[in-house]
Amino acid sequence: MAAAEALDRADDAVDALLESGRRPGDVLVLTVGAAHPWQEHELSFGEEGYWAQLADGGDVFYADAATTRTLRRDVVVLVVNDNHSERVAAAARKALERAAKLLVVCGETATVAPLFA
């Protein structure tokens, strides 16, 4: 699975979560590799406004899995769009801590499966 496919699968997962009744503010999308295009879009308006959206909690929030900021939502979608095992392992640990109820992981099975074995 290429990085772009992992992003596409994550977008599909977010859509399914919202269609199943989850509130947008309950969902956090974390990327291990390159930023999600929506995160890049939101950051283009400035860091202050970007992080204010997290505090507002009204929409799905997109961030880098390696961020040191405090992030926690009911549902975390982890996009494994990088294959560096140390970075992926660290991101998986953080994602588990940040997901209050549900963790969805999107990425290559060969990369992801050993993390949860």
Image (spheres, helix red, strand yellow):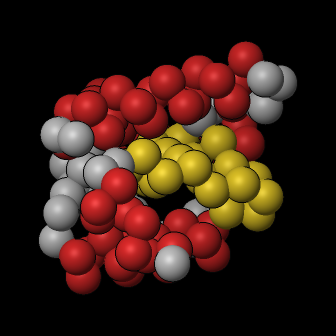
Q: Does 71 appear above or below 90?
A: above
What is the x, y in percent for residue 117?
51, 78
Q: Residue at x 64, y 23 (%)?
A: 16
Q: Residue at x 60, y 71 (%)?
A: 96
Q: Does 87 appear above or below 82?
A: below
Question: Picture quarter containing residue 40?
Answer: top left
- Report the front residue among 110 and 32: 110
The answer to whether 34 appears left or right of 74 in the picture is left
The answer to whether 114 appears left or right of 20 in the picture is left
What is the x, y in percent for residue 19?
73, 17
- Quadrant holding the N terminus: top left
Q: Is residue 27 visible?
A: yes
* Residue farthest top in this picture: 19
Q: Residue at x 23, y 76 (%)?
A: 85
- Report the front residue among 100 and 106: 106
Question: Picture quarter containing residue 62?
Answer: top left
Q: Is residue 94 visible?
A: no
- Count numbered badges in the picture: 0
What is the x, y in percent for residue 72?
66, 62
* Residue farthest right in this picture: 21
Q: Residue at x 29, y 61 (%)?
A: 110
Q: Does 28 appear above or below 98?
A: above
What is the x, y in percent for residue 35?
26, 45
